[in-house]
Every structure is written in C-alpha cells, then in structure tokens.
Image (cartoon, rainbow, N blue to C red):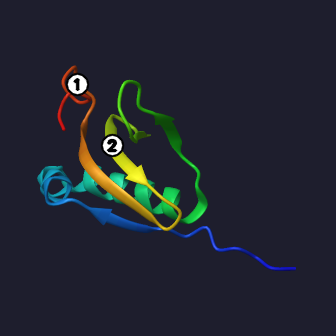
C-alpha cells in the first residue's frame, strides 16, 4: 500500500506577506496555523470564489484568498472579512 503525502507548499505573494505582517500577533499566528493545517491535511473552511478563479479559506474573522494546484497553495490576500475583501485583486 502506498501512502500519498497531502502536504502542500504555502507560498505568499508579496501583497499577502505584507497583509500577514500587518496583522496583530495573535491573529497572525491563527492565520499561519490555519494555512499550515490546510496545507497538511486539506481540512478547513474552504469555498470556491464565485465569478472568478480561486478559493477562500475562512480562519475566524479572517479570510485568505488563494489559488492552488497539486503541490502548492498561493496566498493572494489575507485580511478581515469586509465588504471589499473579495473585490481586492
């Protein structure tokens, strides 16, 4: 029996890295933990975006907009859910 690894590499765009750095420390740790858990297990509150390509991962009050393929997760935006969250990028 072969066990396939589900672990994906998380890559942040420059914009997403700046977004993450701007978060308060506890929120930043929560988002990092949520992204890592999703990368390792595929578990998380993920939905496909409507009207555009990509997905969103809900982590508490924060959202991570991302694209993914078989081996990577590309985080595009990280921030609190607001009326403009999904219009950015």
Residue, far front: 52
Above or below, 69 relative to 2:
above
Give the percent coordinates (x, y) of residue 28.
Answer: 26, 55
Residue found at x 33% / y 39%: 63
Q: Name the side, left or right, on which 45 lies relative to 62.
A: right
Choose the circle earlier in sequence order: 1 or 2: 2
Q: Quadrant of residue 82?
A: top left
Q: Is residue 25 above or below residue 61?
A: below
Quick one: 28 or 3, which is closer to the camera? 3
Q: Residue at x 26, y 61 (%)?
A: 12
Element type where label 1 sits in the image:
loop
Q: From what the image shows, is residue 76 above or below residue 4?
A: above
Q: Residue 76's spot in the image, x, y percent?
A: 26, 50
Q: Judge the density around disc 1: few (<14), some (14-19), many (≥20) Cα neighbours within 10 Å.
A: few
Using the rendered view, name the quadrant where residue 56 is placed: top left
CA neighbours of label 2 inside 10 A, class few (<14), some (14 to 19), many (20+): many
Asked whether 59 or 14 is in front, the reply is 14
> In the image, 23: left or right of 67?
left
What is the spatial separation of the Cα atoms under label 1 and label 2, in whole angstroms? 13 Å
Q: Quadrant of residue 73?
A: bottom left
Tell me what residue is drawn at x 49 percent, y 62 percent.
39
**Percent coordinates x, y for residue 40 in the rendering:** 55, 65
Element type at mark 2:
strand
Residue topped by disc 2 = 65
Give coordinates of residue 41: x percent, y percent: 60, 60
Going by the picture, which residue comes out furthest to the right?
A: 1
Residue bearing mark 1: 82
């Amino acid at each position: 029996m072969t066990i396939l690894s589900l672990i994906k590499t998380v890559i942040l765009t420059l914009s997403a890295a700046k977004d993450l750095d701007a978060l308060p420390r506890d929120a930043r740790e929560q988002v990092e933990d949520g992204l890592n858990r999703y990368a390792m297990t595929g578990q998380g509150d993920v939905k496909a975006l409507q009207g555009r390509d990509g997905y969103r991962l809900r982590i508490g009050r924060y959202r991570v907009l991302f694209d993914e393929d078989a081996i990577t997760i590309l985080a595009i935006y990280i921030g609190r859910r607001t009326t403009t969250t999904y219009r950015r990028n």
